[in-house]
Amino acid sequence: MKQKIENNDNYLFPSGLALIAGLTVFLFNSSIVGPTIQPDEGSYLAIAAAIAGFPNDFASSFHGGYSIFISLAFFVAETPQIIWGVVRAINATLFASSVLALFLLAKHFSPNCTLREKAVAVGVVSLYPAGVIMAGYSSSQVAFVPVFLFMLLSYLRAIHRERGSWMVLGVISGLLYWIHPTAAAPIIAIICGSFYIASKRNRYDLFVILLLTIISMVLLYKEGMNFIVQEHMSISGRSPNYHYPDAMEFLSPLFSLTGIKEVVARITGQIFYFSLGSVGLFWLGLFALTPTLFNEEKPSDNTLLQENAVAIFIWLALVGTMMMTALLFTWKIEAQRLDQWFYGRYVEGVIAPILLAGALNISNQKVLWAIPIAILCTWVFYSEIDSYSHVLRVNIPALWQDYFLHEQEVWGWLVAGVLLVFVVAMVPPSMRIMIVAAVFSFSNYLHIKAHVSSSVDAKNRSEEALAVRGQFAPGTCVGFDYSGVDSYNKYVFWMDFGFVLYDYQLQRTSYDHWLDSCNGPLFSYSDNVNRQNTDVYLRGTSPAEGPMVWGKRNI
């Protein structure tokens, strides 16, 4: 009985910490009034609506795992505004589960640390901008991080246990693929790490169980859930908006010297970002997690076996995700925004354990390694950039320098980041963790402030869609003349309207099809629709050069 009470106490504190963190993040993002990053947010919301029983015309190659979580919002709420509030609440809950998972991991990484030391480390890592600010977006990374962390926890549990634990690990690993295709890297990492364990324990049957479970989960998604959902997201009969390459296209940059150089440059760009964005925690964590990787251990040494297995998983997941990210943006010739040269958003799904290990070892002077590594990486990736456009900050949320040194760009960001890392290395350990926490908090403040403003702009763009919602009943057919969508800005309106009119039959259509088949209005970028038919009239015009709204006099 005493042991049971102690175990309950062990979970009481981290559960309370997670609850407080979730509520705080929800409040921080409470002023964000809607989705802003299209097509990402709009696609995940559209999938969630389809899961909840609202057919639409937004079929795409976005994965639906995260949408399963937020589909609850479409079940319990009836207006876009309330749905968005529930989505943010679900995001905050997922964030809280990440905090709980981090605390449980801290007990594995540093079992001899005090409760206070673990709580401080978890608190600082939870402040890392990607987690806090992404809770204000309807983005797959919100679900990817906690599932990845519980995947690692299940891995640690399975190392010393039997069949059931390996099946659970396989289910969670497969679920990660449901959320985002970059899960391929952690899945390969878990397979390699598990094979290492199997070879040391001479238990290949457990490895086979894991492999078969992962394959079953992936097939269940590709041939089951994804197929069913896509059928409910193609009401116009038009082709889905696929945006991922096939395997050969994805790997094509590796078939030329120019492509390889660009892939390497983008990987070094990511390393530059994580070295400075984490204020050196990234390298402290990697050094802390891999001290015994190349040691010869006895199979019976369970502690050493676990450390090596974790190191193999962490390194392969990290390098694999970086490689996938670099390949994707090298393949996309148009990916010339500056943030796409050191894109962090995908890789931030797998670095939480690394940052945690770094925070638990904050007193280590190896934080200084971040400086020469960042300088070298800057020289490598910046020498490959021929031209670039603006920065989309949601992809590099930890880089606070951009807000103050935007004109100075990469070299100015480098100098500011290097100076900060140097300061952290020179102060006492107790101050280091405070400085890192302050930097993360400041980055969160800057991003959320800008995000609130952009979300208001996005809501204003949707005023004509909101007018349609007030004048026509849910289920009404609403046309969108997709032939006029010839730029990203025009495409954004299509995605914005999709969320506002989630329970309408909003669909891509031609003027003739709308005239014959739709009982609601038409959104079109053409200003002469009424010249083709005198019964068609202009109902309104969207702001910010959005589409005009046309109606038929008989409806």
Image: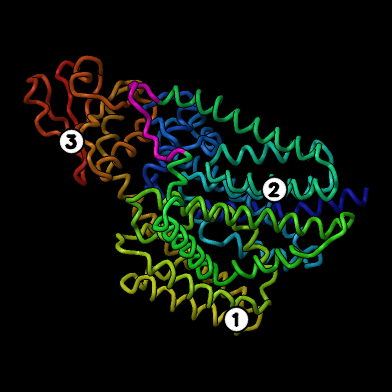
Looking at the picture, tell me which residue is in the foreground, 346 or 190.
190
SS at circle 2: helix
- Part of the protein shown in magenta: 234-246
Residue situated in front as seen by the camera: 266 or 545: 266
Rendered residue at 39%/45% (across/down): 35
Pointer 2 local density, CA inside 10 Å: few below 14, some 14–19, many at least 20: some
Name the kind of residue labelled 1 in the image.
Ala
Residue picked out by circle 3: 525
User: Which sits earlier in the primary sequence, circle 3 or circle 1?
Assistant: 1
| Visible residue check, residue 444 | no
What label does residue 308 carry, if any? Answer: none
The x and y percentages for residue 143 are 56, 44
Give the residue pinned by disc 2.
192
Quadrant (top left, top right, bottom left, bottom right) of the C terminus: top left
In the figure, residue 121 lies in which quadrant? bottom right
Q: Which residue is mark 1?
A: 425
